Image (tube, grey):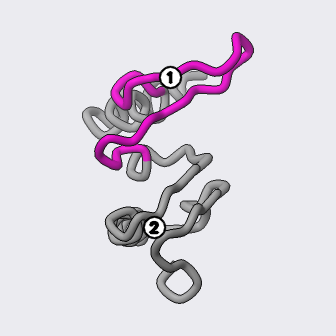
Amino acid sequence: MTERFGGQGLYILDEPEAALSPQRQLAVLARIHDLAQDDSQFIIATHSPILMAYPESVIYLCSKDGVSQVAYEDTEHFQVTRDFLASPDRMLRKLMVR
């Protein structure tokens, strides 16, 4: 993103977080911000609650019922990540019940 992306661009990205650590996702978020400040726009398909957290982003949910706008805190990705980080032991017990 630092070498190939420049200002005043339109970028369509499909899961740019794939294979990136959380720290690298934060670096991507910072680069997106720099580019947005330079009149770039982004359309991003992502499962990353880190990337979805970009301020003033508009998030659309694609489901069997169609496409709808959703608040960040209402995304499944945010909720699952929040719940896991709040209580990993509890979540792991639920997942590993036989």
Residue at 25% across, 34% down: 86
Residue 84: give x, y in percent of width and height.
36, 35
Quarter holding residue 61: top right
Question: Residue 83 bears which disc, if any?
Answer: none
The residue tagged 1 is 69
Which quadrant would the C terminus be assigned to in this image? top right
Alpha carbon of mark 2 to alpha carbon of mark 1: how far?
27 Å
Percent of width and height locating residue 60: 55, 30
Magenta segment range? Answer: 52-75
Magenta span has 68? yes
Count residues near mark 2 (Cα–Cα under 10 Å), then give few for <14, some for 14-19, many for 20+.
Answer: few
- Give the secondary structure at mark 1: strand
Disc 2 target residue:
21
Q: Is residue 30 above or below residue 4?
A: above
SS at badge 2 = loop
Q: Are marks 2 and 1 in contact (CB under 8 Å)?
A: no
Residue 14, x across and y down, in percent? 67, 55
Seen at 58% across and 50% down, the residue is: 43
Q: Nearer the viewer, residue 74 or 11?
A: 11
* Identity of the residue furthest to the left in this view: 86
Q: Amino acid at mark 2?
A: Ser
- Where residue 13 sits, quadrant-wise, is bottom right
Viewer-proximal residue among 39 and 21:
39
Q: Amino acid at mark 1?
A: Gln
Counting residues from the N terminus, which is met first, the one under dot 2 or under dot 1?
2
Residues 58 and 78: in front is 58
Question: Going by the image, does 76 lie left or right of 15?
Answer: left
Q: x and y percent of residue 51 in the render?
A: 43, 52
